[in-house]
Image (cartoon, grey):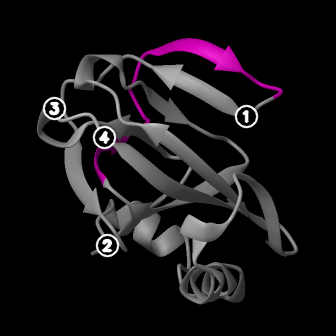
Amino acid sequence: MFATSIKLAEKYNYLEPKFTSAYKWLAEHDVTKMEDGRYDIADGVFALVQRYTTLPFAKARFEAHNDFLDIQYLAEGQESFGVALREGAKLVESNEKGDCYFYETPKFYTQVNLQKGDFVVVPPEEIHQPRAAYQEKEMPVVKVVVKVKC
């Protein structure tokens, strides 16, 4: 599945080498057996393996990044994932050093439900809401966030 604005579909090539190296790395590694942390994949591409318990919808925050696109891949569990255009979203907190910006929940957004083996690609022009519990059922997940330098 690939869902985005037509403006963004023309801006990014999701099959260029930095993306295909990330997809290949995800396919070749059983991240459920890897320790949490950072793994370098290619120049400007790295993976962050993480484990956590999903949150109630109201506690899962919308965020965005300026310097990287995210490939958020679910290796274990289920998660709901909100996505909206960043334009017009209300910024509530900035962490410039960590390249993470938090936003109010927008009035209009798309929700994607992820299960084992699913991923979503999020460019800087979109805000996203990771970690939300699917159907409000909190559960442990194993996720990889692959960061792709813009």
Q: Helix or strand or loop: what does disc 2 sit on?
A: loop
Residue picked out by circle 1:
99
Amino acid type for the residue under numbered disc 1: Asp
Q: Is residue 92 magenta?
A: yes
Q: Is residue 1 left or right of residue 50?
A: left
Cα distance between the residues tagged 3 and 2:
24 Å
Q: Nearer the viewer, mark 4 or mark 3?
A: 4
Q: Residue at x 64, y 56 (%)?
A: 49
How crowded is the residue under tag 4: few (<14 C-alpha within 10 Å), some, or many (20+)?
some
Cα distance between the residues tagged 2 and 4:
25 Å
Q: Which mark is residue 145?
A: none
How crowded is the residue under tag 1: few (<14 C-alpha within 10 Å), some, or many (20+)?
few
Viewer-proximal residue among 38 and 123: 38
How crowded is the residue under tag 2: few (<14 C-alpha within 10 Å), some, or many (20+)?
few
Say if 95 sits above or below 143 in the image. Answer: above
Amino acid type for the residue under numbered disc 2: Phe
Cα distance between the residues tagged 2 and 1:
24 Å
How crowded is the residue under tag 3: few (<14 C-alpha within 10 Å), some, or many (20+)?
some
Q: Nearer the viewer, mark 1 or mark 4?
A: 4
- Which quadrant would residue 76 be assigned to in this image? bottom left
Cα distance between the residues tagged 1 and 3:
28 Å
Residue picked out by circle 2:
2
Q: Is residue 81 magenta?
A: yes
Magenta segment: 78-97
Residue picked out by circle 4:
139
Q: Which mark is residue 136?
A: 3
Q: Nearer the viewer, mark 2 or mark 4?
A: 4
Viewer-proximal residue among 54 and 80: 54
